[in-house]
Amino acid sequence: MSVRHGQRHGRRRPMAEINVVPYIDVMLVLLVIFMITAPLLTQGVKVELPQADAEPLPAEADDPVVVSVNAAGEYFVDVGAGKNDPVDEQTLMARIAAVLKYKPKTPILVRGDRDVPYGRVVEAMVLIQAAGAPNVGLVTEPPEG
């Protein structure tokens, strides 16, 4: 009986190790991609909100529709196509009415820039109520300090 060099009696045992280095590389690449793209996903109209001490919305409320009024007095609605495009009064009312037709309990909020004339924010609230909203809320920032 001859025994070859390098072989033992029986079969070779399979190696039960997983090489995790490629998985770590993939995870690091994904991490970098998400770190770069996350700030780009933030969309919206630049509005400097006034500061006020107010209660937050209850957690069980539906997602609100937010109407923004920027410092130039332009209206923006975060519903429908062109969320970052200014809309006129008729488009504002049509979008709000369409939302309230399908979800009557949807809260409607107004984000008014602190530098916009107060009358322009009131005009937005009047248009929203004319579209059928029973209540309109105002968005503020909590006071600093």
Image (tube, rainbow, N blue to C red):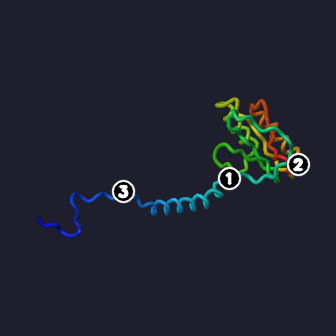
Mark 2 or mark 3, earlier in chain? 3
Crowding at label 3, few (<14), some or many (≥20) Cα neighbours within 10 Å? few
Mark 3 or mark 1, earlier in chain? 3
Residue 140, image x, y percentages: 82, 45
Residue 71, image x, y percentages: 82, 53
Q: Tell me the SS state at disc 3.
A: loop
Determine the residue located farthest toward the left in the rendered image: 1
Q: Which of the 4 image quadrants contains residue 79? A: top right
Q: Which residue is mark 3?
A: 16
Q: Tell me the SS state at disc 1.
A: loop
> As shown in the figure, which amino acid type bears the numbered disc 3?
Ala
Determine the residue located farthest toward the bottom in the rendered image: 5
**Is there a contact, CB below 8 Å, between mark 2 and mark 1?**
no
Crowding at label 2, few (<14), some or many (≥20) Cα neighbours within 10 Å? some
Q: CA distance from mark 2 to mark 3?
A: 71 Å
Q: Residue at x 75, y 43 (%)?
A: 67
Crowding at label 1, few (<14), some or many (≥20) Cα neighbours within 10 Å? few
Q: Residue at x 79, y 32 (%)?
A: 135
**Is there a contact, CB below 8 Å, between mark 2 and mark 3?**
no
Q: CA distance from mark 3 to mark 1?
A: 48 Å
Determine the residue located farthest toward the front in the rendered image: 1
User: Which mark lies nearer to you, 2 or 3?
Assistant: 3
- Residue 117's disc is 2
Q: Which residue is mark 1?
A: 43
Residue 19, image x, y percentages: 42, 61
